[in-house]
Amino acid sequence: MQQLIDDLKSIPGVIGAYIYHPNEGIRSNNLPPLFKTERMRETAKSLVKITAAGRHSFHDLADTFLNFEESSILCRQLSGSNFVIAVCDPEINFNVLTMSLNLAMEDVNSRIAAHQFVQAENSPPSPAPATPPVTAPTMATPSPSAAAQPSPGNLKEELDVVGQTLAKFLGPMAKIVFDDVVENWSQGRTPTRQDFPALIDALCQEIADPEKEKSFRGMVREHIPFAF
Amino acid sequence: MTGTDLFSQYLPQIKGVDGFLVLRNDGHILAQNIEQAEKLASLSALSGINAQSIQKTMGFMPFRHLVFAREHNRSLIVFTLDKFYVGILAKTGFNLSDIIDNVYKFLFKIKIKKISDHSPKEEE
């Protein structure tokens, strides 16, 4: 959750954000100190009321956006009754903001997926995931791994992690790039774990930025050591 | 032409506007051209009141509008105009920012008209 609001804060025009749960109060916060906790809590209560009223009329409500003369607020209900609330400049582009929030949520989900993958590798399978994924109700960009075709052999989970990691660097284009590279990589054979370094090299060529390549390799290495 | 006539005549002409309702801040509808107007009027009034409550709590400048954004359906935009709210159902596929800008231009004209209608010169 902290990662999500930190990603949000990095968007130009976003002053800060916080996560609110009706029963547990403010769970994460990166707004400047001038925003007092009690006021933020009261504001969140009002936003929850607005969202609840909105959902009563619109079952597919995605976001609620409030505009004031010198500021604006975006509120989105996440899974598990959590709400993410972002305080922004009044002139912020609503479409850009919601799309950025979707991408930030995908990023968080991919981290959760990668974390769960590592946990699954290191421990016996558990009946339910420890951390629920964060749902992105609007304009969600499909994760490249979700539709990664083909999914050679029994490497689907590893490919999911690589695809989700790639999405952090290439954004919406990641799906197209990833599918193409995996198709070439697996053509005429069934790849094994030993073939992963070649896949990572091919994806790095597509990233085409030395610093980003380095970060990408680092993030993949963190979860799939045998890829190197 | 009355104020409500102005809304009925001009709001539907704004590009991207699928329907509208004008209501007092107590939820009483003054003009509308949409289905389920009562339901959306209640939503508009309730959300407007809560938005103004947030304004006071946070010490923000005046509330201007709020958007109930939906993925594949008509979004609802609620504007505040003195002691009234104006709800706009936006057609899908239209840029909400453009619709909001155009509605503001119209509301600005309404305000100007209201001021001129009550100017001392005209009262004389």
Image (spheres, coloured by chain):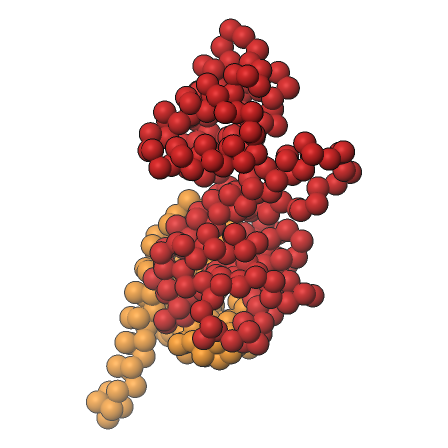
Chain colours: A red, B orange
Q: Residue at x 32, y 75 (%)?
A: B111
Q: In the rendered picture of this protein, how many numbered marks are placed on residues?
A: 0
- Which residue does the image show at 67% across and 46% down from the upper left? A131
Viewed as shown, does residue B14 lie left or right of A144?
A: left
Residue at image x 55%, y 14%? A191
Q: Is residue B75 visible?
A: no
Specify the farthest residue to the top: A188
Position of residue A187 relative to residue B24, above or below, is above
Residue A4 place in picture, x, y as percent: 52, 52
Between A4 and B40, which is closer to the camera in this rendering? A4
In the picture shown, does residue A66 fall above or below A199? below
Which quadrant of the figure contains the N terminus of chain A? bottom right
The residue furthest bottom is B124
Q: Residue at x 53, y 64 (%)?
A: A29
What percent of the width, then of the height, locates residue A215? 42, 37
Q: Is residue B71 left or right of residue B1?
A: right
A170 is higher (above) or lower (below) than B46: above
Q: Nearer the viewer, residue B83 or A145?
A: A145
x then y, percent, for residue B80: 43, 72
Q: Quadrant of residue B2?
A: bottom left
Does any portion of residue A3 appear in the rendered image? yes
Between A103 and A92, which is closer to the camera in this rendering? Answer: A103
